[in-house]
Image: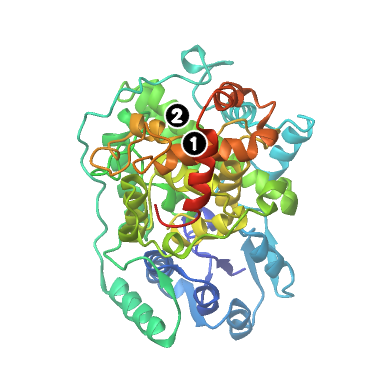
Amino acid sequence: MRRWLFADQLGPHFLDGAHQPVLLIESKAVFRRRALHRQKAHLILSAIRHRAAELGDQAVHLKAETFRDGLRQYGEVVEVCHPTSRRARDFVRAQEKVTVLPPRGFVTSHEDFAAWADGRRGAARLDDFYRHARQAHGVLMDGDEPAGGRWQVRFNDAPHQTELPPPPAPVEDDIDAEVRDDLDRWAAEGIEFIGRDGPRQFPASRAEALDRQQHFLVHRLPHFGRTGEMLAGDPWLAHSGLSTSFNMGLLEPLPAVRQAEEEFRAGHAPLSSVERFTRQVIGWRDYLWHLYWYLDAGYPAGVRTPGRSSIPSWFATLDAESVQARCLSSALAAVRDRGWAHHAVRQAVLGNYAVQRGWRPTDMVDWFERAFVDGHEWVMIGNVAGMARHAELGSVTTEAHAVSGTHISRTSDFCGGCRYDPRQRAGTGACPFTGGYWAYLHRTRERLHGNVRMTRALKQLGQIPDLPEIVAQEHDRGDRAP
């Protein structure tokens, strides 16, 4: 039967054979419905069209106003792998001529995760799932024991000193030129985008994704553990840059992890780096995916908890020039120019500022999904809700995501030359992240009471003599660009 592929199901592992017939549909309504980053829109269309070109006569490639129109235009029965969003799942289930298959592109199956989670009695934590996945799939195991004797291997978090070659840049072709012309025409017709257009920076084909994966294994994997820092002049550091390729289905996660393990076994990469990469791919990535479906519309309840305000326009539209705080301006500029920033910037700067200001989690989920080339609902709900609930998810995670300017100063070079002082919490030179942190703790102290990770911070809060001044200062700042 012909296999209908969504734009995040473009790798060969979404087919049952090299010659299986394929259906690809471009839905213009996807881009009309809400303002995506221009480079994300480009990547989606480029990837679909590159896949169609690879498959040739094996694929039927349709351009339609909606997916429903495309299916009606094709007219025959098709099958599709389980989509990655609830909206898409509900849509395909409602179509008479569409058969829905089990999901692909992840390591642990729905059934195995449900059996594991059911046995945890409401305490389905990431660390426990990660160990379960390692054991179930035989990754980084020496018999029944984890390689090196520990499930998590500490990395020396010394400042990153090694200059690494940048990931291989994709070479745009006639398909990319056609996509850019189409997006220009759509913009002229009134379809809105955010961010800047630019040369495509992420793989749109399986070959490009494999090329970037190989570059990572050779050049970045040995340094992968040093990923908690932030440098204004180096957007990549030791990060893999593979998230878009995994999330579009161009790469398969378990083979990628096994290749990383081979690098460790061959002595080419330290266990600390390979273990951390493994944890992110078969641990955290699968964990977020399965929680999204396991708890379905109820996960997590906090994502629907109203915040104090919606995202202000300067943040939503990536207006980096209006921001004087160097870390936040740099982060917004990175998203504006690339549609991407690594996880430390997302958490410690972008998400952290939203948490401190009390912006609605639902709005932040939508913003991260639209503004990042690797943004998908199943990813962003878990990540953003974790930030917004500030370690109150209980059965999910205990990690906190609100930090002060002093933390940003310790882990980045953003604070040098900034008009704000991360050590000051009040006054004209006070860092908005430092003042905002204490004002946030004051506002949420009752909700955070009992969180063991916040005991020390809440105790410090009670000893701050100028707390009323800080609270008034941050209230007056409101949602203005800092």
Give the position of the N terminus as an image quadrant.
bottom right
Which kind of residue does numbered mark 1 sit on?
Answer: Gln
Q: Residue at x 35, y 75 (%)?
A: 179
Picture quarter containing residue 51?
A: bottom left
Q: CB of mark 2 within 8 Å of CB of mark 1? A: yes
Task: Name the residue nearer the viewer: 171 or 254.
Answer: 171
Residue 83 rendering spot, x and y as whole percentages: 62, 60
Q: Is residue 299 above or below residue 52?
A: above
Q: Residue at x 48, y 71 (%)?
A: 35
Q: Secondary structure at mark 1?
A: helix
Residue at the outermost top position: 149
Relative horizontal placement of residue 470, taking residue 265 as reference (left or right)? right
Q: Residue at x 37, y 56 (%)?
A: 335
Q: Is residue 404 above or below residue 316?
A: above
Relative horizontal placement of residue 317, taking residue 282 as reference (left or right)? left
Relative horizontal placement of residue 203, taking residue 442 as reference (left or right)? left
Determine crowd level at label 2: few under 14, some 14-19, many 20+ residues with C-alpha closer than 10 A: many
Residue under pointer 2: 276
Inspect this view and state whether residue 107 appears. Answer: no
Q: Is residue 233 above or below residue 100?
A: above
Q: Residue at x 55, y 37 (%)?
A: 468
Residue 74 rendering spot, x and y as whole percentages: 59, 82
Inspect this view and state whether residue 367 appears. Answer: yes
Residue 100 rendering spot, x and y as whole percentages: 69, 62
Residue under pointer 1: 280
Which kind of residue does numbered mark 2 sit on?
Answer: Arg
Picture quarter containing residue 321?
A: bottom left
Q: Secondary structure at mark 2?
A: helix
Task: Name the residue nearer the viewer: 345 or 437.
Answer: 437
Determine crowd level at label 1: few under 14, some 14-19, many 20+ residues with C-alpha closer than 10 A: some
Residue 151 rendering spot, x and y as whole percentages: 53, 20
Picture quarter containing residue 174?
A: bottom left
